[in-house]
Amino acid sequence: MATTQSPRTPTRPRDLNAPFFNLREVAWLLDCSVPTVRRYINAGRLPCSQDSKGGTIRVSQDDLRAYHEATRIVALPRRASRRRPARAAA
């Protein structure tokens, strides 16, 4: 019996250096679900292109890099010390 994979299941891209990725491949690359990728696109956080109305939605590798850079978390620099200096004896 043949089984089919859900259209919501992220899949690994065949070529990681491809210029464009479909939604399932983008979900795999971002380690999230396909509906989450759709929400990012609808919110304008992730640009995409479409062949024709109702056609396959594609995201370019450059747009993925820009999204990654815009959303990456950078560690804050550490402070030298949080303790207050000791008071001098009177």
Image (cartoon, rainbow, N blue to C red):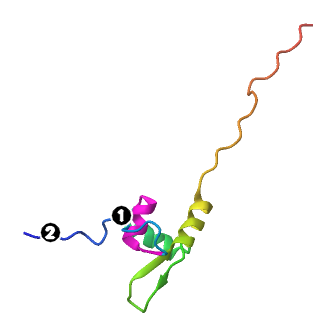
Look at 71% across and 36% down and name the residue there.
78
> Residue shown at 59%/55% (left/top)?
72
Q: Is residue 62 above or below residue 88?
A: below
Residue at the extreme left:
1
Quadrant holding the C terminus: top right
Q: Which residues are magenta?
A: 20-32
Mark-to-mark CA distance, 2 and 1: 18 Å
Residue 43 in picture, x, y percent from top left: 53, 73
- Disc 2 is placed on an element classified as loop
Label 1 is placed on what type of residue? Arg
Q: Which residue is mark 2?
A: 3
Residue 90, disc:
none
Within the image, what quadrant is residue 83 found in?
Answer: top right
85 within the magenta span:
no
Residue at x 52%, y 71% (from the top left corner): 61
> Outermost residue, bottom direction?
52
Q: Amino acid at mark 2?
A: Thr
- For residue 12, the mark is 1
In this rendering, would 89 be left or right of 53? right
